[in-house]
Image (tube, grey):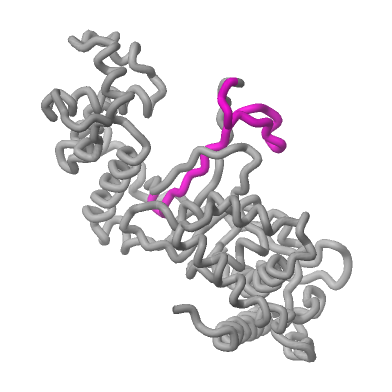
């Protein structure tokens, strides 16, 4: 059960005061962050120095190369299936299977290799296999479907997370990064669109990758679809055992509405903000400007808590719809854009997002380790 409105608002206010106070106290001693008194770009953030390369990285690469020289990718996929058995997740469209699973396993691996590397079924068969193109195409069309692929990926990811040694890889991570990549596609593809930023037609693939470079979710999207919606969709639907409490994105994967929904859904949004020099910090209540005198150049108005209190049930309803998949993420977020500035629920989400974003900015600017 979600907390009531007063308890929820009180928790946000307490966190805002703690974050603003900590940033205000540490700013005079912070050599990496300073505030200008006038101008448009008031926040001055010194660039971070590149981290040194680990001492034993070259030695590790040499040992791996000497132990597994010229390892075939298909052999790695086969070894993963022997240990995990992810091809068991592929089931045919019919009521019964005529081919035995051992025969199907070989064809599954060849089809997955052809699809994953974009080599194609015909090129895979060019290596001298005793299979025909029609046999592989039959397996691809009748067995390799979306649900089976998602279950197989989740099985491999969960097995990888389980066997990692904490003394080498660290404790189980709860952080995940996500970003999109535009790919060219045929004009006949119904999802093909013109991409405004990349100046070309194609589709967008949105990836969720955990801290140690393990992809836990991917989505095929239209170029005009919301990256915020894709980010939330991946966190809620990744189907693996990983518990995400921090989500790292770029400037296109965040917004004030995104901060609000992430707070309601129980994880922290950690964006890399492109225009951070022009950001403002909101106050938890009126008359508290004097408490944060060092932050005066970037302080602005207090948060309208009464608006959040009035619309609290509505924003919880939309967050529950996202969590329970009773509505698609893009469909909900499409309601809360700048075209609906007068929508009271949009105003509430924006106001809540400003409060949560203020907490993040204070922590981000204060902590060198977080940056």
In this rendering, position of residue 344 left or right of residue 244 = right
Residue at 28 percent across and 54 percent down: it is: 161
Is residue 264 visible to us here? yes
Please identify the residue farthest to the front as the structure is shown: 95
Q: Along the line of sight, which residue is nearer the eye, 42 or 47?
A: 42
Image quadrant in which you'd find residue 302: bottom right
Is residue 31 visible to us here? no
Q: Along the line of sight, which residue is nearer the eye, 246 or 23?
A: 246
166 above or below 186? Answer: below
226 in magenta: no
In this rendering, position of residue 236 left or right of residue 7 = left
Q: Along the line of sight, which residue is nearer the eye, 232 or 25?
A: 232
Residue at 49 percent across and 53 percent down: it is: 233
Residue at 58 percent across and 26 percent down: it is: 184
In this rendering, position of residue 106 left or right of residue 285 = left
Write down the region rendered in magenta: 188-212
Q: Position of residue 357 (x, y in %)?
A: 65, 69
Residue at 58 percent across and 84 percent down: it is: 5
17 above or below 364? Answer: below
């Amino acid at each position: 059960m979600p907390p009531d409105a007063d308890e929820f608002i009180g928790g946000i206010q307490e966190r805002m005061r703690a974050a603003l106070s900590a940033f205000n106290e540490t700013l005079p001693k912070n050599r990496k962050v300073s505030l200008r008194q006038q101008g448009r770009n008031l926040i001055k953030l010194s660039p971070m120095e590149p981290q040194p390369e680990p001492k034993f990285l070259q030695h590790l690469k040499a040992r791996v190369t000497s132990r597994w020289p010229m390892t075939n990718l298909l052999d790695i996929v086969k070894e993963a299936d022997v240990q995990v058995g992810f091809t068991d997740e592929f089931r045919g469209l019919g009521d019964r299977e005529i081919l035995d699973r051992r025969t199907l396993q070989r064809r599954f691996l060849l089809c997955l290799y052809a699809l994953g590397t974009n080599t194609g079924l015909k090129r895979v068969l060019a290596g001298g296999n005793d299979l025909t193109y029609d046999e592989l195409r039959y397996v691809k069309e009748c067995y390799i479907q979306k649900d089976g692929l998602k279950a197989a990926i989740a099985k491999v990811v969960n097995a990888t997370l389980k066997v990692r040694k904490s003394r080498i890889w660290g404790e189980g991570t709860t952080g995940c990064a996500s970003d999109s990549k535009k790919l060219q596609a045929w004009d006949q593809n119904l999802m093909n669109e013109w991409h405004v930023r990349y100046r070309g037609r194609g589709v967008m693939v949105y990836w969720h990758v955990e801290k140690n470079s393990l992809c836990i979710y991917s989505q095929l999207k239209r170029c005009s679809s919301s990256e915020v919606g894709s980010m939330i969709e991946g966190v809620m639907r990744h189907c693996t055992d990983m518990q995400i409490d921090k989500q790292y994105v770029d400037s296109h994967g965040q917004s004030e509405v995104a901060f609000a929904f992430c707070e309601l859904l129980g994880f922290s949004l950690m964006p890399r903000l492109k225009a951070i020099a022009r950001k403002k910090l909101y106050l938890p209540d009126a008359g508290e400007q004097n408490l944060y005198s060092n932050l005066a150049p970037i302080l602005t108005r207090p948060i309208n808590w009464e608006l959040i209190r009035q619309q609290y049930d509505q924003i919880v309803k939309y967050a529950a719809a996202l969590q329970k998949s009773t509505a698609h993420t893009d469909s909900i977020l499409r309601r809360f854009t700048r075209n609906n500035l007068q929508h009271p629920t949009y105003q509430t989400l924006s106001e809540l997002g400003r409060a949560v974003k203020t907490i993040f900015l204070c922590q981000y600017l204060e902590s060198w380790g977080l940056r």
